[in-house]
Image (cartoon, grey):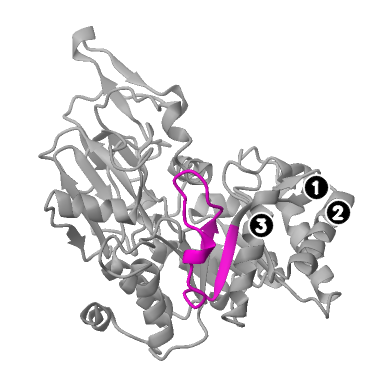
């Protein structure tokens, strides 16, 4: 049926019966073959092909304000499939030491506002080893925060009075907030100005470092590697400046993409390894409803499921973390990202409600499909829904009528924390404190998801022991 040497793309097809035997396809996605079949997901010998029937989707602008733009932009970028992908499943279990070490637990905290109403007063000083406050912007090649954000930063720094080992970093950028980066990295003078402004922030506000979240250098994939090279130069010059600040040392970290095609396009990994203290691997948003990916999927699976091959087989924590290591990043410098939020989908057929079931849009839960953990708990309890736990991927999902959600629980995050511990990675990055259950509405204690990670990495507990402890 398919020519073995053909260069296939992902095809998303819509059939409109009332308009006759006409087929419609997004012109960006390649050539359409004449195919007669029911909606189904297929995997050919070379690349994944997706065939489905779905209505057009509109995204109400009124909802967009309720979701951090960083979430939406990154999820959309992750959903765009490349022309070529590696057909390998990377896995390593070389490290089996179960004793607790000095693992890092980096927690992102979004400035309060709108739905993100978590205040500094509700954050426990010993919950995380590092807190990244998000997000500052780049303005005129300098780091920039508005005055209300500076006030929040000062309150966050005060947490160090209760925990002297706590590190506070300012995260710069975030998806959808990258306008200042290309100009800033363009030449030495601009880079020097930015670095100087960060050093001034470190000294003035007593913070412990900066986290650069540019999503992503050379994102347009236009074969121009200038942005990637300039970003590497920025990190190199940052490291030299830090070494010249013996009285005010600070951390330099980078939030990095998980999909391998973005890694190849955006980063010089082996050089980054020389300059950064660690990277925060954004190993979530692997599956999110878009017109290009109109089917259900796990937000942050630990492993590929049994039937996933080729590109889909790379969309998991195990592949991404080992890929970064293979590309040249020390394992101890890789912090694996764990989400406290989930993604919702609207099913086309409530009876077809498993993994990769056809979906017509994001679900009613959350805004634009982003679901905070307390909302997940409410959905499960109100509808008396029993989640399905996929032991292959160590991921749960739940459905009721047309609603389908992928999310994480204490159980799934405990398995992932064990993976971090047993495989010698540097620790966990959690995104974010705001979407965890900080009000204890789920009756599992405050910040139950972050706590489940902390107990494994700081206490050496197994998944079963952690669950019994609850």
Mark 3 burial class by Cα count in 10 Å: few <14, some 14-19, many 20+? few
Magenta segment includes 122: yes
Q: Which one is nearer the viewer's eye here, 351 or 315?
A: 351
Identify the image quadrant of residue 289.
top left
Q: Secondary structure at mark 2?
A: helix
For marks 3 and 2 on the same chain, the one whose residue lies earlier in the sequence = 3
The numbered mark at residue 149 is none
Identify the image quadrant of residue 313.
bottom left
Tell me the CA gap for discs 3 and 2.
24 Å
Residue that appears at 11% across and 53% down: 384
Mark 2 burial class by Cα count in 10 Å: few <14, some 14-19, many 20+? some
Tell me the CA gap for discs 2 and 1.
6 Å
Q: Is residue 26 left or right of residue 51?
A: right
> How many numbered marks appear?
3
Q: Is residue 98 visible?
A: yes
Identify the image quadrant of residue 43.
top left
Mark 1 burial class by Cα count in 10 Å: few <14, some 14-19, many 20+? many
The secondary structure that dominates the magenta segment is loop
Return the residue at label 2: 193
Q: Secondary structure at mark 1?
A: loop
Return the residue at label 1: 141
Residue contact between numbered discs 2 and 1, judged by CB atoms under 8 Å: yes
Q: Is residue 93 visible?
A: no
Give how far across and how far down residue 30 sits, in percent.
43, 27
Quadrant location, the C terminus: bottom left
Residue contact between numbered discs 1 and 3, judged by CB atoms under 8 Å: no
- Tell me which segment is drawn in magenta: 108-133
Return the residue at label 3: 151
């Amino acid at each position: 049926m398919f020519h073995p040497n053909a260069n296939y793309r992902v095809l998303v097809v819509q059939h409109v019966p009332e308009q006759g035997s006409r087929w419609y396809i997004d012109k960006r996605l390649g050539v359409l073959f004449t195919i007669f079949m029911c909606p189904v997901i297929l995997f050919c010998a070379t690349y994944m092909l997706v065939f489905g029937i779905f209505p057009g989707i509109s995204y109400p602008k009124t909802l967009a304000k309720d979701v951090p733009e960083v979430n939406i932009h990154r999820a959309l970028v992750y959903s765009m499939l490349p022309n070529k992908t590696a057909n390998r499943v990377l896995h390593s279990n070389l490290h089996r030491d179960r004793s607790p070490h000095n693992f890092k637990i980096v927690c992102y905290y979004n400035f309060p506002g709108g739905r993100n109403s978590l205040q500094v007063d509700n954050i426990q000083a010993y919950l995380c080893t590092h807190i990244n406050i998000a997000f500052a912007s780049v303005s005129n090649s300098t780091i920039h925060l508005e005055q209300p954000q500076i006030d929040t930063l000062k309150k966050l720094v005060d947490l160090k009075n209760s925990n002297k080992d706590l590190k506070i970093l300012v995260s710069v950028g975030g998806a959808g907030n990258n306008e200042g980066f290309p100009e800033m990295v363009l030449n030495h003078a601009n880079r020097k100005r930015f670095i100087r402004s960060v050093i001034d922030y470190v000294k003035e506000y007593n913070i412990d470092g900066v986290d650069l979240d540019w999503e992503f250098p050379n994102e347009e994939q236009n074969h121009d590697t200038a942005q990637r090279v300039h970003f590497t130069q920025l990190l190199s010059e940052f490291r030299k400046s830090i070494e010249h600040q013996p009285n005010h040392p600070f951390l330099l970290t980078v939030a990095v993409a998980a999909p391998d095609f973005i890694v190849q396009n955006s980063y010089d990994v082996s050089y980054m390894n020389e300059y950064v203290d660690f990277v925060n691997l954004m190993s979530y948003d692997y599956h999110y409803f878009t017109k290009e990916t109109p089917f259900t999927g796990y937000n942050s699976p630990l492993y590929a499921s049994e039937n996933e091959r080729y590109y889909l087989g790379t969309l998991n924590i195990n592949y991404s973390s080992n890929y970064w290591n293979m590309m040249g990043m020390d394992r101890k410098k890789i912090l694996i990202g764990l989400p406290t939020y989930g993604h919702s989908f609207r099913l086309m057929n409530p009876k077809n409600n498993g993994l990769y079931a056809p979906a017509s849009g994001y679900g009613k839960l959350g805004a634009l499909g982003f679901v905070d953990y307390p909302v997940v708990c409410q959905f499960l309890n109100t509808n008396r829904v029993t989640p399905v736990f996929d032991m292959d991927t160590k991921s749960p999902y739940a459905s009721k009528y047309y609603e389908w959600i992928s999310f994480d629980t204490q159980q799934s995050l405990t398995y992932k924390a064990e993976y971090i511990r047993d495989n010698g990675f540097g620790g966990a990055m959690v995104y974010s404190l705001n979407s965890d259950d900080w009000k204890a509405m789920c009756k599992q204690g405050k910040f139950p998801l972050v706590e489940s990670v902390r107990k494994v990495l700081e206490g050496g507990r197994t998944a079963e022991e952690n669950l019994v402890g609850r």
